[in-house]
Image: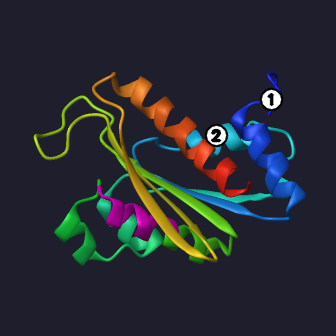
């Protein structure tokens, strides 16, 4: 990536070079990732679309996240992030899908603190999920950090 190239520009360049398509599923970022991708010229060549599933009901209805997974693990979990990414990929037919679900703040709990964000990446070879503890940096900072981390995950997945 050149010093002038953004993460979204690099993502689109790499995806286009490999003729791969991308989809997103977002919760705590509320569409910030999709907005970052579509702000870049040429996004329509590789970005199929995204889902903003802020509520558990929408995670179930639009992405097919099982109610049992939401009950057992909670919305902020690697298990639910994996289901979100799987659902976005299945619904769009994208080669690669990324999901974001977390607690941007304020708030959180002892078990799920503010700044915890779970991500998953779904592709033909399977699904990989991870949790990042950004910490109580404030709502907007956590949301931007989550957006940027998801972009990095996509870029890395594209080699």
Where disc 1 sits, the SS reads loop
> Badge 1: few (under 14), some or many (20 or more) residues near its Cα, within 10 Å?
few
Residue tagged 1: 5
Instruction: Single out the residue that lies furthest toward the left.
Output: 110
As measured in the structure, the alpha-carbon distance from the residue carrying label 2 to the one carrying label 1 is 17 Å
Residue 33 place in picture, x, y as percent:
58, 43
Q: How many marks?
A: 2
Q: Residue at x 42, y 76 (%)?
A: 64
**Which quadrant holds the N terminus?**
top right
**With 142 as the anchor, is 116 left or right in this view?**
left
Of the numbered discs in the image, which one, if any, rests on residue 46?
Answer: none
Q: Residue at x 70, y 70 (%)?
A: 95
Q: Residue at x 89, y 56 (%)?
A: 17
Q: Is residue 75 above or below residue 106?
A: below
Residue 83 located within the stretch drawn in magenta: yes
Range drawn in magenta: 77-85
**With 79 as the anchor, is 71 left or right in this view?**
left
Q: Is residue 19 above or below residue 53?
A: below
Quadrant assignment, res 46: bottom right
Instruction: Single out the residue that lies furthest toward the front.
Output: 159
Residue 59 place in picture, x, y as percent:
38, 65
**Which quadrant holds the C terminus?**
bottom right
Of the pair 46 and 157, the residue shown nearer to us: 157
Residue 13 located within the stretch drawn in magenta: no
Residue 29 place in picture, x, y as percent:
46, 41
Quadrant assignment, res 41: top right
By secondary structure, the bulk of the magenta-drawn segment is best described as helix
> Badge 2: few (under 14), some or many (20 or more) residues near its Cα, within 10 Å?
few
Residue 13 place in picture, x, y as percent:
84, 47
Residue tagged 2: 35
């Amino acid at each position: 990536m050149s010093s002038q190239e953004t993460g979204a520009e690099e993502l689109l360049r790499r995806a286009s070079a490999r003729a791969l398509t991308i989809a997103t599923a977002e919760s705590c970022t509320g569409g910030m990732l999709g907005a970052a991708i579509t702000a870049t010229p040429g996004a329509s060549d590789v970005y199929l679309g995204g889902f903003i599933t802020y509520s558990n009901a929408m995670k179930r209805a639009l992405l097919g996240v099982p109610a049992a997974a939401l009950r057992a693990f909670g919305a902020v979990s690697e298990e639910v992030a994996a289901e979100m990414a799987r659902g976005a990929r299945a619904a769009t037919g994208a080669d690669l899908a990324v999901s974001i679900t977390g607690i941007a703040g304020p708030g959180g709990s002892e078990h799920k603190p503010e700044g915890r964000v779970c991500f998953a990446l779904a592709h033909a070879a399977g699904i990989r999920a991870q949790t990042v503890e950004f910490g109580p940096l404030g709502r907007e900072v956590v949301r931007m950090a989550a957006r940027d981390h998801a972009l990095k995950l996509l870029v890395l997945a594209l080699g």
